[in-house]
Image (cartoon, helix red, strand yellow):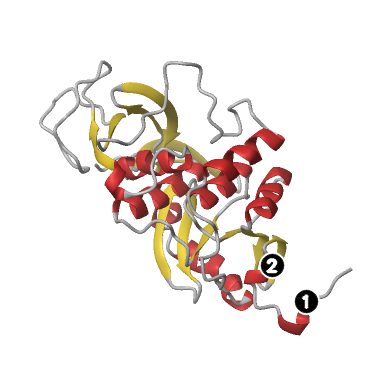
Amino acid sequence: MGRVTERRRVIRIRDGAVSTRPDTLVAEEPLEIRLGGKPLAITMRTPGDDFALAAGFLVSEGVLAGADELANIVYCAGATGGGTSRSSEGESGGGSNTYNIVDVRLADGVPVPDITLERNVYTTSSCGLCGKASLDAVRTIARWPLDPPSGDPLRIDPATLAALPDRLRAAQRVFERTGGLHAAALFTADGELLDIREDVGRHNAVDKIVGRALQDGRLPLSSCVLMVSGRASFELAQKAVMAGIPVLAAVSAPSSLAVDLAAETGLTLVGFLRGASMNVYAGEHRLALGAAATTG
């Protein structure tokens, strides 16, 4: 839609010299997600991949788990709704369409959560739930165990993990122009890049990754590593668990609740992944540590 970046005039000061120049900024706009025509959530996001974002959000809510559970997603025209007939992203004939409202329709037979009451979902750190209640909710509603039924877990070499931040950064096309975006990327255990998404919100970037996987019929992502450009919050750990992703790696620190969730669900959680250094907070059984592993 050509709305990922915008140009603004800035005054630039360098070594005492003052000049004016255009600057490229990342776009930020609200997206309202409706479910069956009823408002469900509003998030600030970078426009683009909006349908994937909505689908991924509903995976983390425990509403969706497969492409067969999703009937379609459409943009709504204007502030009052009026869904378009499209089921994929693109232009529409509605002149009043702001492309900031999407409506998700579930397939027949898929339960629709009650959104007429005050929402008590557990997906965001601002939802009012924390600690044990949040952990219990994710563990109860997650559709897939993080290891396959065979009991043979995904294994990854620490050297492969160490290479992921550079590969993530090299694939961040919009970040190179704006410096203002988070990114999430999906890798194989051998370090092959499968998908990358950028957004002003780190949680939105993950939702876009997961939503695209749902649309393509690839959930659960049981053989993948999720790499994020910032810290590993409870919210991101939860999204990984809900998508069946066994390994979450971040360039910055995890939160205590993210570590608790990883330990309870079997998620491998790696933080401070910088160069050859990293901290493994949970799920070390998936890392090929060999005799190098020590305690102390």
**Residue 63 versus residue 185 in the image, above or below:** above
**Does any portion of residue 98 appear in the rendered image?**
yes
Spatial separation of the CA atoms under disc 1 and disc 2: 10 Å
Residue 169 relative to residue 98: left or right? right
Give the residue type at disc 2. Answer: Glu
Q: Residue most toward the right? A: 296
Q: Secondary structure at mark 1?
A: loop
The residue closer to the viewer here, 235 or 161, is 235
Residue 226 is situated, as x and y percent measured from the top left of the image, at: 51, 59
Task: In the rendered structure, find residue 99 and report the number of the disc placed on it.
Answer: none
Q: Which tag, 1 or 2, sits closer to the chain's start? A: 2
Q: Which residue is mark 1?
A: 293
Q: Residue most toward the left? A: 93
Q: Quadrant of residue 139?
A: top right
Question: Circles 1 and 2: CB distance less than 8 Å?
Answer: yes
The residue closer to the viewer here, 152 or 262, is 152
Residue 190 relative to residue 255: left or right? left
